[in-house]
Image (cartoon, grey):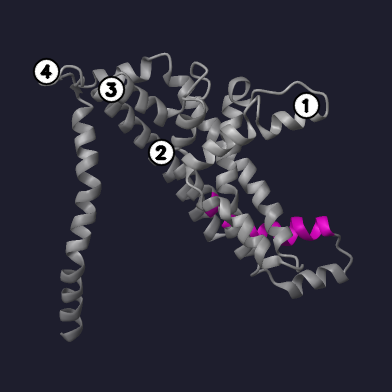
Amino acid sequence: MATEQSRTAARLMVSPAVILLFLWMIVPLGMTLYFSFLRYNLLMPGMETWTGFDNYYYFITQPAFWPALINTLLLVLGVLAITVIGGIALALLLDQPFRGQGIVRVMVIAPFFVMPTVAALVWKNMFMNPVNGMFAHMFKAVGLQPFDFLSQAPLASIILIVAWSWLPFATLILLTALQSLDREQMEAAEMDGAGWGSRFWHLTLPHLTRSITVVILIQTIFLLSVFAEILVTTNGGPGTASTNLPFLVYSQSLLSFDVGGGAAGGIIAVILANIVAIFLMRMIGKNLET
């Protein structure tokens, strides 16, 4: 009886926070869903009309939608490839004992705490500027013509910037998993004549599989909403070469003043993100079962 009363008291104490969190999530989503069914233009206040699914049809059929969707997928896959492979390499390197190991680890993790806007500005002006950037000076030093990264390879440049910001996260998760690897098993395999590549492929990599899956899941959820780096560096251009779904929603809502179309695009982006998240969660569940 006392146990049941304590559980009821615990639920009552927690319920205000749960209700507040629920409202904080549901109310904006509900308003977005409501606006997505309206012809709502900021330049014509008070003239909202119900349009049903017309906003969804218009958003999906506009010429910029499919390039934006493809760019979103390429951005996610490109960043994941760099961060997972680079994270494994850095984790293996930082797991080795050497002088100044703690300082190096802090320096490697530090980029993750830099705000996306600041990181994008630094890369745009200090590294990728075709006139005064560091890469331009490096090209000139070897007698080559400077390359305008943001104009000639905009999506690849954004992938590089975003990967730089997320690489420390992957490194930290993988390094933590690597430190729990059974050292006696590795030493036994080495004594049996197994080379470094064989030990990595048959022992280290299987041990990191779960951590890699977690990194992929968490990063994918956040990478589907990359926006600041695109706004600061390329502004979605040239044309739609670096436009992804979040930037297309921003362009529809605040540049074209079409709140209804932007809200429909936001709902579509949420649906796609949930489909990806559910797929990844199932993949993680199967991985954890094995």
Q: Quadrant of residue 253?
A: top left
Q: Which numbered disc, 4 or 2, marks the residue that appears first in the sequence? A: 4
For mark 1, what is the residue? 140
Do the residues under discs 3 and 2 have CB atoms within 8 angstroms? no
Q: Which numbered disc, 3 or 4, marks the residue that appears first in the sequence? A: 4
For mark 3, what is the residue? 261
User: CA separation, marks 1 and 2?
Assistant: 43 Å
Do the residues under discs 1 and 2 have CB atoms within 8 angstroms? no
Q: Position of residue 148 (x, y in %)?
A: 64, 23
Do the residues under discs 3 and 1 have CB atoms within 8 angstroms? no
**Disc assigned to residue 273:** 2
Q: Residue furthest left?
A: 46
**Disc assigned to residue 126:** none
In the displayed structure, 190 sits above or below 35; it is: below
Type of the residue with mark 1: Lys
Q: Which numbered disc, 3 or 1, marks the residue that appears first in the sequence? A: 1
Q: Position of residue 200 (x, y in %)?
A: 76, 58
Q: Is residue 290 left or right of residue 247?
A: right
For mark 4, what is the residue? 47
